[in-house]
Image (cartoon, rainbow, N blue to C red):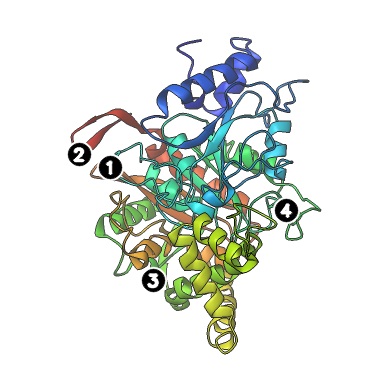
Amino acid sequence: MNDLKPGSLSIQKIQQLLRRREVCTDELRGAAVEDVSRRDQDVGSFLTVRGSYEGQSVNNGGTVSKASLNGVPCGIKDNLCTSDLPTTCASQMLSGYRPPYDATAVKLLRRAGAHVVGKTNMDEFAMGSSTENSAFAVTHNPWNSRRVPGGSSGGSAAAVAAGLVSFALGSDTGGSVRQPASFCGVVGMKPTYGSISRYGLVAFASSLDQIGPLARSVDDCARVLDVLVRHDERDSTSVKHPEAGAFASAVSESEPRLNGWRIGVPREFVSEGVDEPVRHVVREAADVFRQLGAQVQQCSLPLINHALSAYYIIACSEASSNLARYDGVRYGLRAESADVQEMFIRSRSRGFGQEVKRRIMLGTFALSAGYYEDYYLKAARLRRMISDQLNGSFEEYDLLLTPTTPTVAFRLQERMDDPLAMYMADVCTIPANLAGIPAISVPGGFHEGLPVGIQLMADRFDDRKLLTAARAFELSTGHHRRRPSHAEEGEMGRCGR
């Protein structure tokens, strides 16, 4: 049992071990907790680790089916409600808070038998691109401890990359699943908006938020989606996905081909502002897709250049509204004061970090009288135009190929004093959130020992097509099989096959 590291195993491998009775679920759960407790000190991916594996609602009965997650260890981003573990959103505002219920996504995982090892670190209230905005801990990139893991789901991405869990859940508002997936060399997917219930996800920007899985392969990602993609009446934005339950079957072919597929590479995503090594990886990816039988050609989406501006006005405006509930009276930290107004000010000043305060103020300004039409209304109209242009591109192309991020993982503290530079880390991922379309990041190559992700986007509800292409790419390249080494030599860590 001491040699068993369940988090380093694929979902399929764990299923095989259970079917052959080479291991039982109790052994898997115990070994997962022990492994995380021992090895996460160097990574810092978890905020809370389960002390034992007792007390979880799991379904161990019946036959272990192909879609089952029995015994599979996973991490849950700390903005998803868990009834048996704290949910803090990495903020002093919710320090120690324990919800009375599980988020729908967590409940579905537990019903499938997945073992929730703990809650992963994140940028406070999901506002950030490096996981440096957490009020409680710093998470390090497993490929190089001096680099950020990305954000805001950096803890989830780092835990998967380090082999601490087989998969993890994150939330993606402007790229918070895909951007850290790129930085950490794992697969991260944002499904079509509304595919996975947001019930129990602490809201940041409700029209943009979407839960998504992070895993070490497209196959594992698809298996998790088969469990999570369900209609939920408790979420008014939940949709009945026409391909629900068919994601794993989309990647079951041993050598999928893409004959006749058309893939566009928008020039706006590979222009100035994107580092040359990243552009090189995208060009190499385009060649791989051509070898798989696809037609790949450059295209143009000029409105994409305005996506970042529209996003931050809309996201901050919705955050201003959603976070108004944390007033020291109904929710969150309460600073004692005889005066109600003073208590309100002190509670929010002490409870929120700098980046959260910045976005609340930006959003409040954009929604204020005299500025609403000049900022929020214009951003909403621009969002519709961007969405229409993106959706229109899928009349000509099956998929769009872009970088996931304009750079590799940057150094810790490098951008903390430059919010605009930090926001630029999401410039490639934001358009998919504005349009509500599915997008996935898969390992596309490496630069100086650091992972570089490529992003694929598809039309609404074409998640299955997206997974098929991503699986074909990863089988053709094998980049997803590379693992970071915990034994670093100087500045750069070693990586192995």
Measured Cα–Cα span from mark 3 to mark 4: 30 Å
Q: Which comes sooner in the sequence, label 2 or label 4?
A: 4
| Distance from Cα at disc 1 to Cα at disc 2 | 8 Å
Q: Disc 1 marks which residue?
A: 146
Residue closest to the far front? 338
Give amino acid for label 4.
His
User: Sequence-wise, which precedes: disc 1 or disc 2?
Assistant: 1
Are the residues tagged 4 and 1 within 8 Å (C-beta)? no
Residue labelled with disc 4 = 241
Q: CA distance from mark 4 to mark 1?
A: 41 Å
Residue indicated by mark 2: 491
Q: CA distance from mark 3 to mark 2?
A: 33 Å
Residue 18 found in image quarter: top right
Type of the residue with mark 2: Glu
Name the one closer to the observer, 247 or 335. 335
Frontmost residue, 47 versus 341: 341
Instruction: Check contact, mark 1 vs mark 2: CB within 8 A.
Output: yes
Read off the residue under disc 3.
268
- Nearer to me, 173 or 407: 173
Q: Position of residue 263 (x, y in %)?
A: 47, 60
Q: Is residue 112 visible?
A: yes
Question: Which structural element holds mark 1?
Answer: loop
* Residue 215, x across and y down, in percent: 51, 38
Q: Residues within 10 Å of mark 2 (few under 14, many from 20)?
A: few
Residue at point 35% right, 56% down? 282
Q: Could you say whether the residue bearing mark 3 is in a helix, strand or loop?
A: helix
Binning the other alpha carbons within 10 Å of mark 3 as few (below 14), some (14 to 19) or many (20 upward) gives: some
The numbered mark, 4 or 1, whose residue comes first in the sequence reads: 1
Comparing marks 3 and 2, which lies closer to the viewer? 2
Question: Where does residue 82 sit, x and y in percent of width and height?
Answer: 66, 39
**Label 1, label 3: how many angstroms apart (C-alpha)?**
31 Å
